[in-house]
Image (cartoon, rainbow, N blue to C red):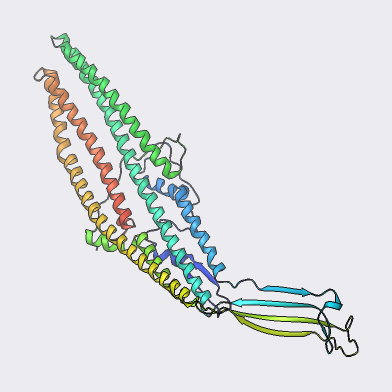
Amino acid sequence: MTLATSSVGCVQTASRIDLARLDKEVVAASHESIADAPPDIPALTGPVADATAVQAYVQRALVENRTVQAARHNVMALRHRIRQVTALDDPVVSNTIFPVPSVAPQYSLMGYNPYNMTLAQQFPWFGTLQLRGQVAERDAQVALAELAAAQLDTVAAVKRAYHDLHAALTIDQALQENHALLVDFQTIARQRLERGGSQQDVLRAEVLLSELQRDRATNRQAIASARAALGRQVHASPNEDLRTAPEVALNDVPFQVDQLQGLAMAARPELQGRLAAVARDEVNVALAHKRSMPNITLGLTYMNMEKTNSVTPATAAGMPNVGLFVGFNVPLDRTKYRAGVSEAQERALADLKLYEAQLDETLGELRDLFAQVQTQRETLGLLRDQVLPRTKNTLELAGTDYAAGNVDFPTMIAAQREVLMVRIQIAQAEAELGKALASLERAVGTEINQYPTR
């Protein structure tokens, strides 16, 4: 959204916020217009079949997240400031009454003066109101960038928590399947016991089943923590049984790091907010110069005159008097105003340096996150395509050989534990990749896969 100011001379500047234009400036960073909210809040409980179910959490968070709501209300508040700072001060009306004729002003040619009424209006120096409106506009642009940043923070936090929850639920499923496999191994061990096998194998299977129950209890705590983190972002009840889709879509990054840096410079709301602050400070410098100019006060006086109660009623005309006056303050202390200009200039330089610092931080963060994404994707591909198939083949052979009496129980269990560890590592690698992608999008300031590859 953008802000537009319209002015009429020095008397009054009427300003308004054009939300559609200001949206365009940070559209890549903002997931939702502050003027429009989705009418329906998606339900999040129960099994979810859609592989893009994370978007349901994102949509709900953008509506329900309290930090986003606070940032939205801050923008709406600043919308109303513009009209205030661009309006003239209220006119002043005063009335002096002289109720006792004998001690009131008396004029031989005009008569008795029972009261004087004065109407005065102060006008700031030419262009001051317009500059005030421009400063308020830039403040609203800064607040809108903060809203977009709050939205992006929420989206990234939702995706991170979602991937943690998905990993914990996937690990829980793997542990359940491993439990069934251990039960089968225990059955085989008992069958071998009848043919002269070792009782020790049966006992080892029971110990492993107990250890597996302990692992599941620990993983249930991870599920609860991930649900709590996700629930905080979407403002969900602690009792909601939040679920994830069976599979998560982990997109490729269609850009090189240099292209991502260029995209971030255009889209990241923190950078846009810093630029808006610099622009505001430049207007504040011009406004500080205006403060050294006088404010003009124009006024009208009305003196009522009466023959009644006049000291000289024979000569008094009793005609009211109307007068105009003009006044202005005299800015004598020039050092004070020069100090104000210097302060505004220093603030502009400070915000410019903050922009440069934010830019440096963004570029460095992008390179780090891009490397993380590449590393996690390579790790995940290696685990899925090479390590897991080999460990499954090893386990299958070990189970067959154990049933035939060709290998001992520890060899079979070692193969089974290796498959479980690889499945857990895959779930964790998926989560780390998903979180790295979410952090990368947060650093860029937009969903990077919505743009075509260049």
Q: At 29% from the left edge and 23% from the top edge, which residue is drawn?
A: 213
Answer left or right for 433 relative to 199.
Answer: right
Q: Is residue 49 visible?
A: yes
Answer left or right for 432 relative to 142.
Answer: left
Q: Nearer the viewer, residue 301 or 338?
A: 338
Answer left or right for 135 relative to 407.
Answer: right
Q: Quadrant of residue 390?
A: top left
Compared with 347, 8 (above or below) is: below
Q: At 12% from the left edge and 26% from the top edge, which residue is drawn?
A: 397
Q: Position of residue 316 (x, y in %)?
A: 86, 88
Q: Quadrant of residue 146?
A: bottom left
Q: Position of residue 237 (x, y in %)?
A: 47, 38
In the displayed orientation, state which residue is furthest to the left. Answer: 406
Q: Position of residue 40 (x, y in %)?
A: 49, 48
Q: At 8% from the left edge and 19% from the top edge, which residue is drawn?
A: 406
Q: At 76% from the left edge and 78% from the top edge, which residue is drawn?
A: 116
Answer left or right for 239 relative to 390.
Answer: right
Q: Nearer the viewer, residue 159 or 52?
A: 159
Q: Position of residue 34 (x, y in %)?
A: 47, 58
Compared with 225, 42 (above or below) is: below
Compared with 31, 98 (above or below) is: below
Compared with 199, 319 (above or below) is: below
In the displayed orientation, state which residue is furthest to the front. Answer: 103
Q: Nearer the viewer, residue 20 or 394?
A: 20
Quadrant (top left/top right/bottom left/bottom right) for the C terminus: bottom left
Q: Is residue 453 visible?
A: no
